[in-house]
Amino acid sequence: MSRVNSTTSLQALAQNADSSKENEQVRLDFGNFSYADTPKVSRDSSPAVERASRFNNNEVEQRYHIPNEAGLEHLSETSDLITKGFNKVLIANRGEISMRIIRSAHELGMSTVAVHSYDDRLSMHKYKADESYQIGVKGQFSPVGAYLAQDEILAIALKSGCHAIHPGYGFLAENSEFAKKVEDAGIRWVGPRPETIERVGDKIKAREVAIDCGIPVVPGTDGPISTHEQAVEFVEEHGFPVIIKAAMGGGGRGMRVVHKMSELQESFERATSEALASFGDGTVFIERYVERPKHIEVQLLGDGTGDVVHLFERDCSVQRRYQKVVEFGPAVSIDDELRQKILNDAVKLAKFVKYRNAGTAEFLVDKQGRHYFIEINPRIQVEHTVTEEITHIDLVAMQLYVASGRTLKSLNLSQENIKLYGYAIQCRVTTEDPLHGFQPDVGRIEVYRSPGGPGVRLDGGSGFVGSVITPHYDSLLVKLTCSGSTFEKARRRTLASLVEFRIRGVKTNMSFVQRLLSHKVFISGDCWTTFIDDTPELLDTHVFRNRSTKLLAFLGDMVVNGSNVQGQVRPALPGLEVPIVPQVIGNDGKVIDVTTKPPPGWRQVLLEKGPKAFAAAIRAHKGVLITDTTWRDAHQSLMATRLRTAEMKRIAATTSHAFSNAFSLEMWGGATFDVCMRFLHEDPWDRLDQLRKLVPNVPFQMLLRGANAVGYTSYPDNVVYKFCKEARDHGVDVFRIFDSLNYIENMRLGIDAVRKANGVVEAAICYTGDVSNPRPDSIYTLEYYMNLVDELVALDIDILGIKDMAGLLKPQAAKLLISEIRKKHPDLPIHVHTHDTAGTGVTSMLEAARAGADIVDLALDSMSGVTSQPCMGAFVASVQGTELDTGISLDTIRSLNSYWEQVRILYASFDPGVKASDTSVYYHEMPGGQYTNLMFQAQSLGLGMRWNEVKTAYAQANMLCGDIVKVTPSSKVVGDFAQFIVSNSLKPEEVLEKASTLSFPSSVVEFFQGYLGQPSAGFPEPLRSKIIKNLARIDKRPGIDMLPFDFDKLRKELEEKWQSSSIREVDLLSAALYPTVFDDFMAFKEKFGDISYLETPHFLNPLEIDQELEVEIEKGKKLVIKLVTVSQLNEALGRRDVYFEVNGELRLTYVLDNTVKATMKTRTKANSKNAEDLGSPMTGEIVDLRVEDGDVVEVGQTICILSAMKMETVVSAHKAGKISDLSIAIGDRVEQGDLLIKITPVEEKKE
């Protein structure tokens, strides 16, 4: 395909230019030297005119291409290089180097021809060239094999009229056979003569040349070796360590260091196989391995006449797996004497063979400063850009000039004219994942934003948005070369450029390279070849957050699959908006500036004086104090605990001023802990940290389930102690400690844990029944509760809580119970909590306050009533101006209430629709929070129309359990039992009769075993025995015999599983308390990132086409996101493509449509939790398979060989056992994580 597709008018343009500039001479400047006074080529033979003759008359194409083509015509017309016999070059390569050669060729006025494999048909180099041709037909060659197809490439060159072939590096660049074919066909080879390649490109023969020149070499084999036995023979004579090297090629391919005999055969086989795959020649040789050497290489340029110059040296010591990662020049850690010796030896060697074109002589320098020749690379190298930046010489241009027949002398290129200009550093940005052993990554580049500025150079080939990175080729994405007047300036510029880079869609090594450039060894410039291997801390890399990419994945999933937030009883309302924060008027009548520091509150008393003095001050306080439950129990009761942190943060500063004299804000613990992770995809510890920072003055209160912490079962004691300590350290002040069965032994653990954490111990008795009118058979009498209070007081608690979770505390009962406690314990602060399910909440709280309660729990008006807490405004108004005055104004409540009214609308999809009070609570005794949750669960299970039956069954289930206290987790037991009864249409007597044959919910079975503790009235028999059958009976505190939890082991497991070295202490607790929930939460974060900065309207509702939103991902950083379109369903993959604009840039994300099933067969993924599964460590191709189904293997035994980007990886058995479910074959392509095999235990033979 021609670079220009249009215009005969350009012919006239070229002819006019020709006639006006017939005798003009040209001067082209290449940095510090130039060449001039070369007569222009005849217009009759101008390649520009030849190209123009191929143009058509498409006016549209003219309009778009004339400006570019006019510039290209000028370059051709003013070139001193091209002639009729040398004006068109084919680049026998791909990617970055192909683009690099095209640029220099165009600058010199040459036409360019690109070749490509079928798999590279969309690659950038194809479109940068004037013409491009596919090598063979689809399926004829492998992706790499196409670029090794000598005859096909040569045929393309001949057919397209090329005068030269530039091989770049790799592939056929060092193939003397191909070079000879090219020259025999009458085409110029842009490189050394074929015989020179044969002589020095082969590392074995190059050693012989060096020896003939008297240049020191590392001891090695006399020639190539082809068998493992020959390798053994060498090491038996010279010892270990040794290095096996491919005779042809470079770039770390076909290299293996061997330290012991047991590794030799495998390493030999891998080196030969890799060399064959990469260079088409599997020949290898062996040398003694020099420990921790420097790798110094000299850039050479010769013209074939014996005239050779060097362009100074590069330090290429920073390598991984013998592949260079960072190169710089000149070397900073060798002295001038050694530098000159190396330069002289390099030139001496090149002159000896009359070297032609560009090449590199490479040396090792040992710790004693001795240098050894190792090889000549007879080609341009990846790192040639370093030399170009420090000498200002275009090496590719020089290659083309030399290939055209020009001598160094004619180019005015003498050694004395070549000067150094500062320093340069090149980094190879690759699609490799440092956190997974530098495994090559594949995928589509979704974001590509590159750096720029003075001294910043980029050489890329596949670095652009939409580029698909495959496993077939080298992982190099782009080369970043930065220069500066000093090494330090070059280093800082390189580091700053890496920071500026943004590449998303594939993993890269940039974080690793940043850490490398920041290391003190690199800063000194004194690196060695195993520096990376010897410095494991370099791998502690920063994980790029990819926030926008992950956010788009979430938004795209919402668009395709709808909201994934469970608990919605109806779709979210359309057109939702973020609630507006109201102004609050102070006592002085002025608007409070909530950006200022809030006034001191009760928290300052606690921090200054400690829990005991704090409790005494509360008791001495005149008036009733309030706890606002809006941030926890209120939304748990009204909207299934689905309130996000965002809504609390927005009103937090205002609340800290408005409620500065409140006793506490209940905002953490209980169900909010796991719901944060499970449904809201938030970290509960982050919620606590963020809100604590915004509200420094009001005590935070949490709900602690005694020995259950914030879980639904018992845990080892050290988990509870650690949890309380971390909660206190992160900002919890008051711990309301309770047990769902009022089991003192469970509470005793929680009380002690909170005391040791220096928190306020508020021990709560859970209220049920009716002390003012108890049933004849009920144990829940005034005496029962007074005995409980006495037991708790004996444990030296700070505050007594009365926790009425169902709203059963009638006004007269509140008066009776509180007054009796106050009489017996006059100095004990009393804190009362109830629900307003029956509609008596405010009255009950008033009676409690009058009877001597110090603190009452209330919710802001719009978050109060029915299953929530009593109305704050009503209570405050009732005591205003009395001795029970709360000190909170109704104006303040009204202002805050206007915000929460908006929140109720925002979260209306979670509102179960409890419209009014329900006095049936006195019958079923269902806790307020559970009432709404159980209603939703009943609807989800198809029992919505039978809700009254569920309530009746709840009362029946309670009695079957022995008439227990019903608070989480015991309330969950009764709720599960009730739904079980309704689902199976059972009557209580049928349950008793058939218990031994029924399959009860696990929560019910565990309750009867004793995992929650001991009920006050004991377990009902014989029901208990029928339900648990032969299962264990626990008749004491469940966790008392548990071994301490191994947090160190858990940390290692989590760090390995999530590839993170930043697992926090609080993460360990989340995982210990809720292992599955935490895993799911982490998996969600890994896929979608942190979505807490997404405003709730967009968390609940998917975007519409052309809808735009603004997301602040951190202070001062905003994303403007617009949904552009959604594709039709791809039935084969079962996915849709969702297109967004992000800050004006088009972005694409792929989303699986959960409503359909893909028709294309996909491989099973290895289950990371199943020890039997062995997954693929990276994406690649199976090139060798060493096992069969049924084979017995040992740990470390080779299973298969995986090849990706021309690097081979041995996949070994992770455990001993028997191979089963072998799902791979040679030639299969696998993705990272695909299941390869299962290794099952070997059954022992019976005697």
Image (cartoon, rainbow, N blue to C red):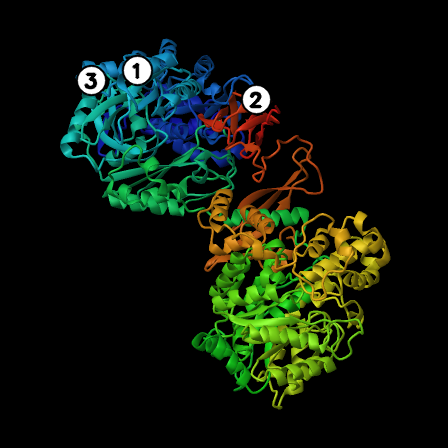
Q: Earlier in the sequence, mark 2 or mark 3?
A: 3
Q: Is residue 1179 above or below residue 733?
A: above
Instruction: Please tell me whether mark 2 or mark 3 is closer to you in this view.
Output: 2
Residue at the image point whose x is 71% and y is 82% from the top: 843
Q: Viewed as shown, does residue 561 lie left or right of 341?
A: right
In this rendered view, identify the residue nearer to me: 1039 or 933: 1039
Q: Which mark is residue 351?
A: 3
Task: Give the numbered dot on residue 1191.
Answer: 2
504 relative to 358, above or below: below
Instruction: Label 1, secondary structure: give it.
Output: helix
Labels 2 & 3 near each other (Cβ < 8 A):
no
Q: Quadrant of residue 158?
A: top left
Compare marks 1 and 3 and give the one earlier in the sequence. 1
Amino acid bearing label 1: Phe
Q: Residues within 10 Å of mark 1 (few under 14, many from 20)?
A: some
User: In terms of image quadrants, where is residue 319?
Assistant: top left
Question: Which is more foreground, mark 1 or mark 2?
Answer: 2
Q: From this view, report whether residue 796 is shown above or below residue 479.
A: below
